[in-house]
Structure formats: structure tokens, C-alpha cells
Image (tube, rainbow, N blue to C red):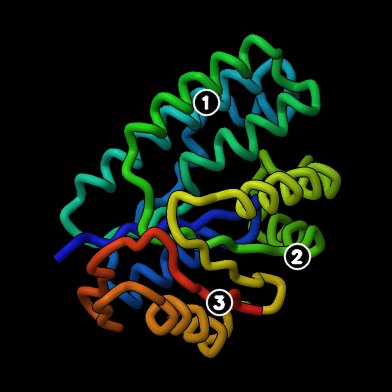
């Protein structure tokens, strides 16, 4: 039996951790969560992005690479909250293009990222949670993290643009896009079951899936037809 590796991607506040937890419980997968609060640069970064962007992104990249290595070695099926790809393709690129990361720092960061990603096995499926800025701002305010208080709608809009461009060109594995504006998978059992059903019932070329317990895809195809939710 091949192990299943599911990755969940999406903007700040979209619900990655919540979906990770619910999928892990539903399918008996092992969750790997994004480590946010332990970044020693994060609060400084939100106060002065230009000064602390490189430090913060290198820290995130190192942690993400370690998580990726650990989940690949884990014996159970796994679901990951935020991926190593997003660090470079979304956040570091946005910082550089906005003038908040120096060109030589960004070049060094990209070189490290590209070398490491070549060595990493990709996920079997990428779940992309997509939501508009009003939804993101509402959820960020609700969870009340101090270091996120100064996040602006413009910043989230920029990140959404990078996310959409990245997902459109992502080819390492199939992508399932979920409309997180429409589906409230935290409060609505029906909405969550719709997502779980998309994972289990629209797996295209995968040859064996069990809904509960040891859920797995027996092979990773070059492509698969996952219909978008929404």
C-alpha cells in the first residue's frame, strides 16, 4: 500500500489548519501543522518587513523543509497544513516584488529553495483553499492573533494574486480547488462532507480509495480530473 500525502495550500486566514484537523480526524490521517507562533522573527517582520523579511522567510523555509522530510518518513497517511512551495512562490516573491526583500537576499533564497525542492517528493494531491479578501479579513479578526492585527486588505489581495498564478502553473500533482467563500467546512457538516466526497469520489486515475480509516491512493498519476468545488 502506498502512503498518501495530501497538502493544503491557501492564503492567511483561509482555514488551512481547520481543514487539516477535520480531514485528519475523518480519514484517520496524521496531521502536520504549520508552526507559526514559534518563528522568533514574525512579530518583528510585521512591524518592519524590509528589515526582517529575509530572516523570517529563511526560518519558515527551514521549518517547512524539515516538516516535509518528517512527513515523507512518517508511516501513516499524512495531511499537511501549508507547503514549502508557498513560502517561495507566494510570500518571498511578494516581499521581493514589493521592495521588502533585497535582490541579493531573494536570489540566495530562491537558489536554496530550488535546489531543495528538486530533492523533495511532491504530494499526491494539493488542496487549494480559495477565498476573497472579506472572508480572509473576517477570519483573521476572529482568531485574534496579535501579530496579524496589522495585516491589510491590500496585502491579502496581493497574496491572492500570487496564489492564483501559482496554482494555475502548478504541475507537480493534481490540484483540488475549494471555494472557501461558499463552503464553511468548520460549522457545516454538509459542506465538509462535500469536500471529503470530492477527495474520495473524484480521484480520477487513482485505483483504490477507502472512505474511512486507511484511506489511500494506490498510485500518483501524471494528471487527474478533480472537479473544483464551487
N-terminal label among 1 and 3: 1
- Vertical order, 12 against 204 (above or below): above
> In the orientation shown, which residue stands out farthest toward the front?
222
Residue 227's tag is 3
> Residue beneath label 1, please?
40
User: Disc 1 vs disc 2: which is toward the camera?
Assistant: 2
Name which residue lies at 46% across and 61% down.
Answer: 174
- Whole-percent x, y for residue 193 in the image: 47, 85
Name which residue lies at 41% across and 66% down.
Answer: 21
Label 2 crowd (10 A; few <14 / some 14-19 / many >=20): some
- Residues at marks 1 and 3, CA–CA distance in whole angstroms: 40 Å
N-terminal label among 3 and 2: 2
Mark 1 and mark 3 in contact? Answer it, CB < 8 Å. Answer: no
N-terminal label among 1 and 2: 1
The quadrant the N terminus occupies is bottom left
> Residue beneath label 2, please?
135
Helix, strand, or loop for circle 3? loop
Label 1 crowd (10 A; few <14 / some 14-19 / many >=20): few
- Vertical order, 73 against 93 (above or below): below
Name which residue lies at 51% across and 41% down.
Answer: 85
- Whole-percent x, y for residue 155 in the image: 79, 42
Residue 30 visible in rendering? no
- Whole-percent x, y for residue 39 in the image: 51, 31
Between residue 210 and residue 146, name the one nearer to us: 210
Amino acid at each position: 500500500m502506498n502512503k498518501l500525502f495530501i497538502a493544503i495550500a491557501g492564503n492567511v486566514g483561509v482555514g488551512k489548519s481547520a481543514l487539516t484537523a477535520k480531514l485528519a480526524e475523518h480519514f484517520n490521517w496524521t496531521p502536520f501543522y504549520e508552526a507559526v507562533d514559534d518563528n522568533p522573527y514574525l512579530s518583528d517582520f510585521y512591524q518592519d518587513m524590509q528589515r526582517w523579511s529575509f530572516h523570517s522567510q529563511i526560518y519558515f523555509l527551514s521549518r517547512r523543509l524539515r516538516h516535509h522530510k518528517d512527513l515523507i518518513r512518517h508511516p501513516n497517511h499524512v495531511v499537511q497544513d501549508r507547503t514549502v512551495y508557498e513560502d517561495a512562490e507566494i510570500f518571498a516573491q511578494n516581499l521581493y516584488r514589493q521592495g521588502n526583500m533585497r535582490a541579493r537576499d531573494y536570489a540566495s533564497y530562491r537558489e536554496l529553495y530550488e535546489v531543495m525542492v528538486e530533492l523533495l517528493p511532491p504530494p499526491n494531491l494539493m488542496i487549494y483553499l480559495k477565498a476573497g479578501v472579506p472572508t480572509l479579513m473576517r477570519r483573521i479578526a476572529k482568531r485574534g492573533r496579535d501579530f496579524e492585527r496589522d495585516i491589510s486588505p491590500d496585502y491579502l489581495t496581493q497574496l491572492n494574486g500570487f496564489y492564483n498564478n501559482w496554482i494555475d502553473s502548478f504541475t507537480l500533482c493534481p490540484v483540488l480547488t475549494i471555494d472557501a467563500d461558499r463552503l464553511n467546512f468548520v460549522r457545516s457538516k454538509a459542506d465538509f462532507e462535500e469536500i471529503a466526497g470530492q477527495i474520495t469520489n473524484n480521484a480520477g486515475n487513482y485505483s483504490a480509495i477507502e472512505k474511512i480509516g486507511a484511506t489511500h491512493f494506490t498510485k500518483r498519476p501524471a494528471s487527474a480530473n478533480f472537479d473544483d468545488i464551487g
